[in-house]
Amino acid sequence: MNAADSESLARRLLAAGYQEDSLERADVAILNTCVVRQASEDRVYSRLHELKAWKTPERTIAVTGCIVAKEGEGLLRRFPHVDSVLPIGEYEDFVAGLAARYDYSEGEALPPAGRTGVSHYVRVIQGCDHNCTFCIVPRVRGRERHVPVTDVLEECRIAVDAGAREIVLLGQNVDDYHDPGGNGGLAALVRAVEKIPGLRRLRFMTSHPQDLEPELLETMAASDVVCRELQLPVQSGDDGILKRMARGYQTRHYRAIVERARTLMPDLGVVTDVIVGFPGETEAAFLNTRALLEEIEFDVVHLAMYSPRPGTFAATRMTDDIPAAEKLRRLNDLLALQREIATRKTARWVGRDVEVLIEGSDELGRPFGRIRQGKRAVVLRGSGVAPGDVINLRVVSATAGQLTGLPAA
Ligand code: SF4
């Protein structure tokens, strides 16, 4: 979501005649911030402190993203070297204001997706109507606003015309999408977007187990364009903890979704999020999460230690009772378990041919991209392969996070 916001702001600045440059040479530095965890927020403050040495009267520092919603103008008092705080998406006045400070030549009028790469992110929902007790997103991103299907389609078409081969539909809870004009939900939107000529791949994220409709899984299974990847956070494998998190489902419901999805799409990649050390997470509750990871064998698990976020129900009404060292032990335990599961699962790709959409080159100059199930793949001896190409790769080796192979005949 933040990457999409950064792109949107960058496109406006480029269209106004500005250029990207190194921090040393730049006149303007803009921090797009995340506060979903305490560690992310701490990183923002640390960067702002670092920028104090960079700041001169001629230079401008602006801050946008979720920290603006959380801290507001208070940031300007706490960090007097910051010139502007920009609410998410409200960039026009800022860009216009820069023109009064700096000489610039009018840039070419770039199309809205003129900077698009191989993948283009399209926000279809802003905000979230859930109230998970640990989550600060509803506070900083507000309630859901749904983008009309016609606007989504227009942005997708422009991006594909500009060279995008993959569209990623974004929402904090993308399954809750519905067209404000009454033209259906996410499954209908997916069926409309996948028909755009020239589009090779379509993804969406992030799903919510309470809102995911069976129709969406059937739409995925019937499509050659929609990727075989489901981003479905479970957060905990313990029903008591899920209740305290106010997630709105139990583990048997989650299992049923994954089972149905894998029946329809046996090669589906399933990605999840898990929080360890949530208030009240006993050893037994933790072991339930561990058992769920062993049972489902996720392709990727994004693991985080619980950190109280100000203003959330969990922070104000629950005691953060799991010591930091114990949270870390649980985190490391699940990291090791998941590494072993992912290594075992990716080994199954060795010897098979997979379709890779090339995104760029790695630090060794080897083309890389992703397979339809979401796994990263690197092409050995990939001369003549360019970003945007779709190639068949014969997988010769695999690690937990990556496949490596040669172009297949
Ligand atoms: S559904 Fe996701 S974004 Fe919404 S409150 Fe829950 S965790 Fe936060």
Image (cartoon, rainbow, N blue to C red):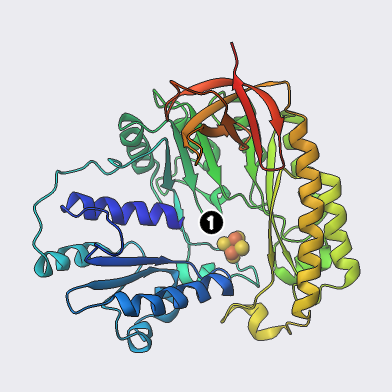
Query: Which of the two residues, 101 or 366, is positioned nearer the viewer here?
Result: 366
274 versus 221 height, above or below: below
Vertical arrangement, residue 330 with respect to residue 358, above or below? below
Q: Position of residue 315 (x, y in %)?
A: 64, 81
Q: Residue at x 63, y 25 (%)?
A: 405
Q: Is residue 177 above or below residue 133?
A: above
Q: Residue furthest bottom?
A: 77
261 or 4: nearer the viewer: 4
Residue type (three-letter) at the residue carrying disc 1: Gln
User: Residue at image x 23%, y 72%?
Assistant: 60
Q: Position of residue 149 (x, y in %)?
A: 40, 41
Q: Is residue 11 above or below residue 215?
A: below
In which image quadrant can residue 355 be found? Answer: top right
Q: Is residue 40 left or right of residue 269?
A: left
Q: Quadrant of ligand 1?
A: bottom right
Image quarter of residue 160: top left
Which residue is depicted at the point 33% across and 61% down? 89
Left or right: residue 96 versus residue 299 is left
Tell me if the residue at label 1 has its CB under 8 Å from ligand 1.
yes
Residue 282, image x, y percentages: 87, 73
Viewer-nearest residue: 151 or 324: 324
Is residue 13 at least partly visible in the picture? yes
What is the crowding at mark 1: few (fewer than 14 residues within 10 Å), some, or many (at least 20)? many
Per the image, label 1 sits on a secondary structure element best described as loop
Q: Which residue is mark 1?
A: 172
Q: Residue at x 48, y 62 (%)?
A: 127
Horizontal relation, residue 78 to residue 46: left or right: left
Image coordinates of residue 151 in percent, x first then y, are 34, 43
Q: Is residue 244 left or right of residue 153?
A: right
Residue 86 can be seen, yes or no: no
